[in-house]
Image: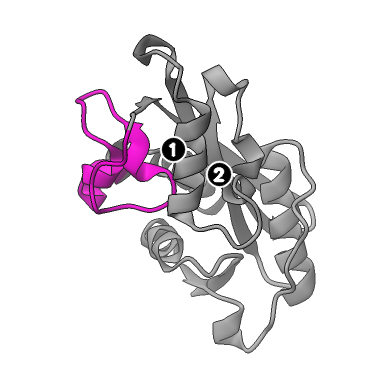
């Protein structure tokens, strides 16, 4: 079975990727499991796709193995697309999810409901070899709520409201996978990998 390095320590991402890679004869592994230490990469890209490429390229060059990386974040229309690629750094160094949510809600306290539209984006980059790079991008539209709701998920999930009035944090893992930006990107990646590995 071919092994792909996943440039992430997020076990949920690794599990999701392993699920779609396995039927193609590919096993998702972390650098750590191979005894390799991946240096922190400075995400200097102006888009999610650029940052995903930076991370995948760094993992590919360090390990010499096929590598997959993703970059994702929240884009709020009323904030001109912020926090965008700075989603994880929105509230500064050392901030946690609750700090980032608090800053977002503070910055949107005077924004009426009809103008609280937003979307999540996930860009995935897969470098198979020096001549083969596969990219996929998924999106999910929603509205920013006025207070956190739900105990599940992570990041901005408790304030990202879906079409049925629930937040991402209130959805089951299966429900979220079915509509989320990452789920949509992974399905595109799966189709592209099938073309490469199965000639479909």
Horizontal side of 198 relative to 94 (left or right) equals: left
- Quarter assignment of residue 56: bottom right
- Quarter assignment of residue 146: top left
Q: Is residue 86 above or below residue 108?
A: below
**Disc 2 packing (10 Å; few <14; some 14–19; many ≥20):** many
For the question of whether residue 200 can be seen, the reply is no
Task: Name the chief secondary structure element in magenta.
Answer: loop
For the question of whether residue 80 can be seen, the reply is yes
The residue positioned 56% from the left and 39% from the top of the image is 136
Residue 139 image position (x, y, % from top left): 47, 31
The residue positioned 70% from the left and 75% from the top of the image is 38
Residue 151 falls within the magenta-colored stretch:
yes
> Distance between the Cα atoms at labels 1 and 2?
8 Å
Q: Residue furthest bottom?
A: 35
**The disc label shown at residue 99, or none:** none
Horizontal side of 119 relative to 126 (left or right) equals: left
Q: Is residue 153 above or below residue 31?
A: above
Give, as a single range, the part of the protein colored magenta: 147-176
Q: Is residue 155 above or below residue 76?
A: below
The residue positioned 19% from the left and 25% from the top of the image is 164
**The disc label shown at residue 72, or none:** 2
**The disc label shown at residue 181, or none:** 1
SS at mark 1 in the image: helix
Residue 155 falls within the magenta-colored stretch:
yes
Do the numbered discs 1 and 2 sit on residues whose CB atoms are within 8 Å? yes
Residue 11 image position (x, y, % from top left): 43, 68
Q: Nearer the viewer, residue 196 or 41?
A: 41
The residue positioned 53% from the left and 54% from the top of the image is 197
Horizontal side of 172 relative to 168 (left or right) equals: left
**Disc 1 packing (10 Å; few <14; some 14–19; many ≥20):** many
């Amino acid at each position: 079975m071919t092994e792909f390095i996943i440039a992430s320590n997020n076990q949920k991402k690794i599990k999701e990727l392993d699920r779609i890679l396995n039927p193609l004869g590919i096993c998702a592994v972390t650098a750590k499991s191979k005894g390799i230490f991946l240096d922190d990469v400075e995400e200097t890209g102006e888009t999610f796709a650029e940052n995903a490429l930076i991370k995948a390229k760094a993992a590919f060059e360090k390990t010499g193995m096929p590598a997959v990386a993703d970059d994702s974040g929240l884009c709020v229309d009323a904030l001109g697309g912020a926090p965008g690629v700075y989603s994880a750094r929105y509230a500064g160094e050392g901030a946690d999810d609750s700090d980032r949510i608090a800053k977002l809600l503070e910055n949107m306290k005077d924004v009426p409901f009809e103008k609280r539209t937003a979307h999540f984006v996930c860009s995935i980059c897969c470098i198979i070899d020096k001549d083969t790079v596969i990219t996929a991008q998924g999106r999910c539209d929603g509205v920013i709520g006025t207070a956190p709701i739900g105990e599940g998920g992570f990041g901005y999930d408790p304030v990202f409201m879906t079409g049925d009035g629930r937040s991402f944090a209130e959805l089951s893992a299966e429900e979220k996978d079915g509509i989320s930006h990452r789920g949509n990107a992974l399905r595109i990646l799966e189709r592209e990998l099938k073309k490469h590995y199965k000639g479909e």
